[in-house]
Amino acid sequence: MRIAIVLTGILLLVSGCVDANTAKDKDVVGKASKLGRQPVTIAEIKEAAFDKVKELMAGVPCQVPAVGPETSKNLRDLTQIKWEKGGTSSLDFRGDIMIAAKSGGMGIVNISNPLEPWHYANFSLNHGYGDVKISPDNMTAIGGAGGTIDLVDIRDPFQPVLAGQWRLSQAGRQSQGFLNAHMLYTAMIKGEQWVFVAANNNDGVWILKLKGPPEKRELEFITSTLPIEGGPLGPHDMWVNYDVDLKKWLLYSADGFHGWAVFDVSDPAKPMLAGGLVRPETGYTHTIQAAKIGGKRIVATIAEVGVNLLEVYDATVLQAPVLLGAWHVNEARQDPPQPLAPQHEFNIVDGKLYLGHYANGFYVFDLTKVVLPVAGSADLKPMAHYAAGTPTITSLFSQVWSVDIVNGVLYTSDMGKGVAVVGFGCNVPGDAKLTSNG
């Protein structure tokens, strides 16, 4: 692919600029310098970069005695990605490429060296994006902006080009007044590329097919999960993954005031309800993910409006999920009490849940300790906390949007500051398995 060719060229040029004769640069190039030469392949350059991260993380513990309002000792700031103006909301990753929704558009960044992220380019049509995702073939950035979805050709990351646009009005569905391409998800299912859209309409998750060559992309509305689903604002977010136990593609939908639902989308044109939980919610169910932990299918949800709880379920039987435990930020921060403090997005990686919590920063939970045989008996407490500042009653919807994990390193999008790159003492820097897919 062109994007891989361009990236290879950049890294080889960078490696040619390193002077391995100085002690400082020998530290930077790490293992390759021990061989008496500069790193000359992408793998060697990345290994050298992560060797440096490991040095910086030496002595940072995995476990800490207690988690309070300050940043816990098992987290360490590594660097910061800043934009000329404004902060960051949604992030998506493919390999060494990061797409960031930022003020006025999206940024494209190379993160092969997490200590020195490299900014390729910005793309802007003078509007911001509520969510950005990369197509399954890695050639298109997909940005949801109100009533429009932009399709951006990123094969040359230095020169992103608009390859198509699709308006939510083209779906032919009756708007209930809030149509908004706020949250997106992409998946390659049986050789075809699909885009799932939470359109803030009470008619389920919209299912679209991505078509055409990368220089001229189109979206075609196919169907939605249910004719009525999600309450006044509809489903808010979704997560799509192949379930190796059921041998089916499953779509998990955060159904706002209706709870959550799961659909078999092995044939995306014919979604079939497979399970979930419909009940009155204390809050607006915002985000959902699932993971196989301790031999069970674990589903987690968070809420954003109302009395907001992180809830963890055993959904081994999709039609009969069992609540294992719940957590509210007031359990960790009592001064001042925040009964309505909003949560936002999260990712589950290797049994740990990384929760973006706006002005409260982010928290990390070990879900392996939640998988208990007795329903409701879990003692769900955070094992790490990253402080974004001091929350106030007027700042609760500011700061941390999400936490993504790539090669064991945390990328924390901040609506005011950009992206904080953070090390976590439980993660091995450079471990490709420690990468989120949310």
Image (cartoon, rainbow, N blue to C red):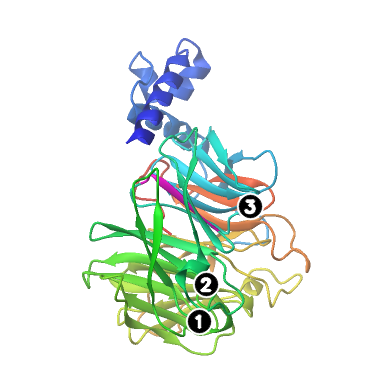
Residue 16 on the magenta segment: no
Amino acid, disc 2: His
Query: Residue 378 in the image: x percent, y percent?
Result: 46, 78
Q: Label 3: how many residues lie within 10 Å, few (<14), some (14-19) or many (20+)?
A: some
Height in image: 264 above or below 164? below
The C terminus is located in which quarter?
Answer: bottom left
Query: Disc number at residue 358?
Result: none
Question: Could you tell me which secondary element the residue under label 3 belongs to?
Answer: loop
Amino acid, disc 1: Gly
Instruction: Give the alpha-carbon distance from disc 3 to disc 1, as whole Å.
Output: 27 Å
Height in image: 188 above or below 259? above
- Nearest the eye: 287 or 121: 121
- Nearest the eye: 49 or 345: 345
Per the rendered image, the range of residues in magenta is: 138-144
Q: What secondary structure predominates along the stretch shown in magenta?
A: strand
Q: Which residue is mark 3?
A: 127
Q: Which residue shows up at 47% across the image and 22% down it?
A: 27
Q: Are marks 3 and 1 in contact (CB under 8 Å)?
A: no
Height in image: 318 above or below 182? below
Amino acid, disc 3: His
Question: Could you tell me which secondary element the residue under label 2 belongs to?
Answer: loop
